[in-house]
């Protein structure tokens, strides 16, 4: 370990506070954090020269790989022009161009309006405030309840946290949350008294797959059925495609697979290719027009962020969309999805693998005792497996004892083979034969 790495680790342990991390263990003298210094394609390199496949796309963000020349050049060119200008009282070229291109991605431009924010959590906050104010402006203030699903994770800001169905993340702050009804299925939704009493403003769901719940798949056809229920009831449908957007499920957006368009769509993470923070909330003309009026009518959506519509981030997002168009990303992805499915099928015979779920280029691998009984949560089996996998060239994180594989879309078949083999060897090392 060189002197510079020693200093970086020392400063980190003295001064930083990492997310979702017990800092006592992190700061322990015998813990050596990875110092990641370089990325190229699907590969990350640390300060000691060790290379790893970016097996969770740097927390589900990176789409086209690190150092992609189109995105890097777009960022550089925009920096030469201007790094940031206010979106309050002015606009900028990349933000207007990006909004135009996003609207064109949906049939008949059903989501023509883009509201910019900073990350997935704030994209959800925007959607919630739009939905609640919409019904007030429509003369239906009794529609103030939000419906979310058990196991959901939509972010950690106050409104987004209200939707969360994972007690570990959200229970401490429950008394401060928005009024939310939580259901496990469409049957429970239909049985809600508030649903029939027209008190539901919006229903929020991660389409096709719940990420932080352990990569749990929704039944096929469920999303289309939910769209029909919203149409019949009048409730707005909010889709959280922060995880699933931009090719992760095999199509550009997960909702395409059930041929539906939501009333509000939250996008972030992969929007810029994973290079810069940027989020959008897309919505319909109907919702947008409800906010139009004279100043004194006070219909304005009073919400925003200092870096709303940041031109450098928007330039990166434009370059990412260009890559999808020019490099046939989705077409090339289909064979990789099939190859990954074959590799994962070979893991199923391992006695410590209880279940494997795949949705496009996303996979969740459940680790259990051979009896099928979960390991004690205190043992941190999933985390230990992921640490062991580093020695075999894979960098990823678990959700409890579910090992997540979600590499950049540029990952090669050879790299996929390395990743799955790393999981196999790490499971054997931690759990035994």
Image (cartoon, rainbow, N blue to C red):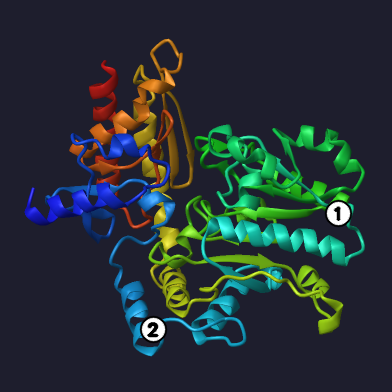
Q: Quadrant of the C terminus?
A: top left
Q: Is residue 387 visible?
A: yes
Q: Are marks 1 and 2 in contact (CB under 8 Å)?
A: no
Which percent across, then down, holds residue 387?
26, 35
Rendered residue at 70%/57% (across/down): 128
Where residue 266 sits in the image (x, y, percent)? 61, 59
**As drawn, 177 above or below 309:** above
Q: What element does badge 1 sit on?
A: loop
Picture coordinates of residue 182, whole percent (x, y): 72, 37
Q: CA distance from mark 1 to mark 2?
A: 43 Å
Mark 1 and mark 2 lie on one chain; the one further toward the N terminus is: 2
Mark 2 surroundings within 10 Å by alpha-carbon count, few (fewer than 14), some (14 through 19), many (20 or more): some
Q: Does dot 2 land on a helix, a strand or a loop?
A: helix
Q: Residues within 10 Å of mark 1 (few under 14, many from 20)?
A: some
Question: Looking at the picture, does residue 97 appear above or below residue 35?
Answer: below
Instruction: Please provide percent x and percent y for residue 221.
Output: 68, 42
- Residue at the location (41% across, 87% down)? 82
Nearer to me, 187 or 279: 279
Q: Nearer the viewer, residue 195 or 356?
A: 195
Label disc, if present, on residue 78 of the rendered structure: 2
- Give the number of the disc on residue 328: none
The residue tagged 1 is 234
* 100 to the left or right of 288: left
> Looking at the rendering, which quadrant does residue 66 occupy?
bottom left
Whether 362 is drawn above or below 351: the answer is: below
Q: Is 295 in front, or is 236?
A: 295
Determine the residue located farthest toward the top in the rendered image.
Answer: 371
In this view, the residue farthest toward the left is: 2
* Residue in view at x 36 percent, y 40 percent: 397
How many numbered discs? 2
- In which quarter of the view is residue 331 placed? bottom left
* Left or right: where 273 falls relative to 184: left
């Amino acid at each position: 370990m060189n002197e510079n790495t020693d200093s970086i680790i020392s400063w980190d342990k003295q001064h930083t506070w990492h997310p979702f991390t017990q800092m006592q263990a992190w700061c322990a003298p015998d813990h050596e954090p990875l110092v990641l210094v370089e990325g190229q394609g699907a590969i990350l390199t640390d300060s000691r020269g060790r290379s790893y496949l970016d097996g969770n796309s740097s927390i589900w963000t990176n789409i086209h790989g690190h150092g992609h020349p189109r995105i890097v050049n777009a960022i550089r060119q925009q920096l030469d022009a201007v790094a940031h200008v206010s979106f309050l009282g002015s606009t900028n070229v990349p933000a207007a161009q990006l909004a135009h291109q996003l609207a064109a991605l949906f049939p008949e431009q059903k989501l023509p309006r883009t509201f910019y924010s900073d990350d997935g959590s704030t994209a959800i906050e925007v959607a919630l405030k739009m939905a609640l104010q919409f019904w007030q402006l429509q003369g239906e203030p009794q529609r103030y309840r939000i419906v979310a699903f058990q196991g959901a994770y939509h972010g950690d800001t106050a409104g987004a946290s209200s939707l969360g169905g994972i007690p570990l993340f959200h229970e401490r702050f429950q008394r401060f949350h928005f009024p939310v009804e939580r259901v496990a299925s469409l049957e429970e939704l239909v049985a809600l008294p508030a649903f029939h009493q027209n008190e539901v403003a919006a229903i929020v769901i991660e389409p096709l797959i719940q990420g932080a719940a352990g990569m749990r798949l929704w039944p096929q056809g469920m999303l289309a059925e939910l769209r029909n229920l919203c149409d019949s009831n009048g409730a707005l449908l909010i889709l959280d495609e922060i995880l699933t957007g931009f090719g992760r499920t095999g199509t550009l957006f997960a909702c395409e697979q059930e041929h539906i368009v939501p009333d509000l769509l939250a996008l972030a993470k992969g929007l810029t290719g994973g290079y810069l923070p940027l989020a959008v909330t897309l919505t319909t003309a109907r919702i947008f027009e409800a906010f139009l009026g004279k100043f004194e009518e006070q219909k304005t959506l009073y919400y925003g962020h200092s870096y709303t519509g940041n031109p450098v981030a928007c330039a990166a997002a434009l370059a990412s969309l260009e890559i999808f168009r020019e490099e046939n990303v989705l077409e090339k992805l289909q064979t990789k999805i099939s190859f990954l499915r074959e590799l994962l099928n070979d893991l199923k015979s391992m006695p410590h693998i209880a279940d494997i779920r795949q949705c496009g280029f996303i996979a969740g691998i459940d680790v259990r005792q051979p009896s099928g009984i979960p390991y004690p949560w205190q043992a941190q089996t999933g985390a230990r497996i992921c640490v062991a996998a580093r020695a075999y060239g894979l960098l990823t994180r678990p959700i409890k004892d579910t090992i997540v594989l979600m590499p950049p879309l540029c990952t090669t078949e050879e790299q996929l083979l390395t990743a799955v083999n790393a999981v196999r060897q790490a499971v054997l090392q931690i759990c035994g034969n």
